[in-house]
Amino acid sequence: MLQTTTTAMSHYAILTAMLAPAFFLTATASLLMSANSRLARVVDRLRALIVSWDNDAPDRAEREDQIRRHRQRAHIVLRACRLLHGALASFVGTSLALAMDAFLGFRLGAVPTIMAVLGVLFLLAASFSMWREVSLAVKSFDLELDQEMLRRRG
């Protein structure tokens, strides 16, 4: 009876450890949805700028500058999405490594911990990328607003 209870408790401990990365998975998935949404908005804005650029707008040079800035933003968000996918894979890998480690008699050593740390590093890098993109978005908006205000005054 004691052996059965001990075995059941060790299974629960393993399952609990496997669920811990789920919190990181949830946070990462939320950030990934946000990043994908930002990427879609940047792409939509780029398409609108290209249409106005093609129509030979009088402010063609300004449009080219806006297109360059939005293209840079799109690449930053894409980098963040890639990092977030790396984080998701690492956290799923952490759960699987914990299960395999228990199955193999705890022979994997630091592998589950390394996978978790890798996931957190991916998450951190993605957060910095998104921070940079948001900063560029505000800067771009300020420039566009300044240009419009000058145009309306002149």
Image: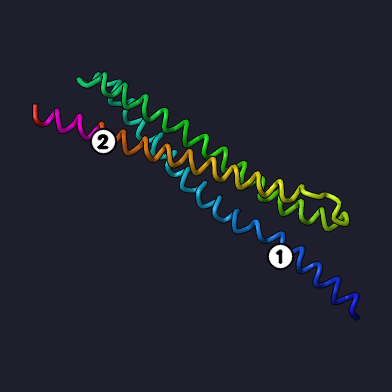
Q: Secondary structure at mark 1?
A: helix
Quarter residue 132 falls in: top left
Do the residues bearing badges 2 and 1 touch, measured as CB atoms within 8 Å?
A: no
**Percent coordinates x, y for residue 129 in the rendering:** 48, 38
Q: Which residue is at 76% across, 47% downward?
A: 111
Q: Counting other residues with Cα less than 10 Å from the Cα at mark 2, is it few (<14), some (14-19), or many (20 or more)?
A: few
**Color theme of the render:** rainbow
Question: Position of 43 compared to 153: left or right?
Answer: right
Q: Residue at the spot x=31%, y=35% of the render? A: 139
Disc assigned to residue 16: 1
- Magenta residues, start to end: 144-152
Q: What amino acid type is highlighted by mark number 1?
A: Thr
Which residue lies at the image location 86% right of the left edge and 51% below the top edge? 107
Q: Who's the residue at 39% across and 36% down the image?
A: 42
Q: Is residue 85 left or right of residue 30?
A: right
- Residue 24 is situated, as x and y percent measured from the top left of the image, at 59, 54
- Of 36 and 109, nearer the camera is 109
Magenta stretch: helix, strand or loop mostly: helix
* Residue, disc 2: 142
Q: Quadrant of residue 73?
A: top left
Q: Quadrant of the N terminus?
A: bottom right
Q: CA distance from mark 2 to mark 1?
A: 48 Å
